[in-house]
Amino acid sequence: MSLFWTFAQFRNGFGSPNFGAFKGTSRWICTMLNAAAADRNKEPILAVLKSRVTSDRHLMALEISSGTGQHVVHFAKAFPNITWQPSEFEAQSISSIEAYRQYHRLQNVKPPIYLDVSQSWENWGGFEVESCDLVVNINMMHISPLACTMGLFNAVGKILKRQGLLLTYGPYAFKGSITPQSNVDFDQSLRYRNPEWGLRDVSFLKKLGQENGLRLEEIVDMPANNQCLLFLKDSVV
Ligand SMILES: C[S@@+](CC[C@H](N)C(=O)[O-])C[C@H]1O[C@@H](n2cnc3c(N)ncnc32)[C@H](O)[C@@H]1O
């Protein structure tokens, strides 16, 4: 065996398993971060994906803002025919995704790439026009500046294949109104933390999708007052 891996997994004070890897003489520690929300929502989101992605041919999926890496390993186990490309903006999250990837030894998860979703698609790690079958983006649009939402739709309109699927998940506003009160409070707390954050309106996202060749096909109600938005790429843009 050319590579000799040993690892020690233990829980630190924040409940995050650490994964220490040794390769030759170099050693690094990657922390498998844990997001409680990801543990709760990964199975309901997977159920939506299973209802829509029924082909067993090889497919290419990109996850934007993969966070800890919990989602991508969960989805990759359920879809062995899909090659998953996780991506992140924050260094700590990239490290966590890599720790999950190594721990689960999944052949169909690529090493995470740095991806700033607010940047033009040409800077998205070398993706080509119409190269992805599926793009997944969970709980990002409301916790990032509007430029991230704009960048997401702009780039996905380019890199998604025809009939490819964009799945976004999170809490949304509908026709200018947010319900229930817990989502109103959440929106206010987000805007207080950063005036550029906040729940995005589905009407606005539908229009943004149309401008980029992405048709909002379905809205699926999810637990805890969240929704999955499913956009289909109809046309070349
Ligand atoms: C609430 S976390 C969600 C993470 C993960 N998708 C999940 O559901 O557990 C929001 C994510 O948005 C990412 N993000 C913020 N700005 C970004 C940007 N410019 N490009 C890509 N991701 C960004 C953060 O790094 C963070 O991982």
Image (cartoon, rainbow, N blue to C red):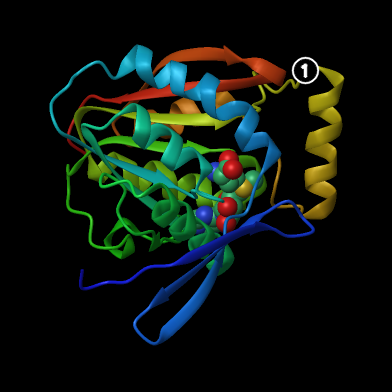
Ligand 1 has an atom within 8 Å of the beta carbon of the residue at disc 1: no
Pick whichever, 174 or 51, lies toward us: 51
Dot 1: few (<14), some (14–19), or many (≥20) neighbours within 10 Å?
few
- Name the residue rendered at 44%, 59% in the picture: 98
- Tag 1's secondary structure? loop
Residue 175: x and y in percent read 65, 18
> Mark 1 — residue?
179
Q: Could you tell me if residue 140 is visible in this image?
A: no
Residue 211: x and y in percent read 35, 34
Residue 169 vs 190, above or below: the answer is above
- Work out which residue is located at the far left of the displayed protein and give it: 57
Type of amino acid at the residue the image marks with label 1: Thr
Pick whichever, 46 or 212, lies toward us: 46
Q: In this view, does 193 lie to the left or right of 41?
A: right
- Name the residue rendered at 43%, 67% in the picture: 6
- Name the residue rendered at 81%, 53% in the picture: 193
Q: Is residue 236 left or right of residue 51?
A: left
Res 79 → quadrant: top left
Q: How many marks?
A: 1
Res 74 → quadrant: top left
Q: Which image quarter is the C terminus in? A: top left
Res 38 → quadrant: top right
- Name the residue rendered at 62%, 51% in the picture: 144
Pick whichever, 64 or 6, lies toward us: 6
Residue 45: x and y in percent read 50, 24
Residue 107 vs 216, above or below: the answer is below
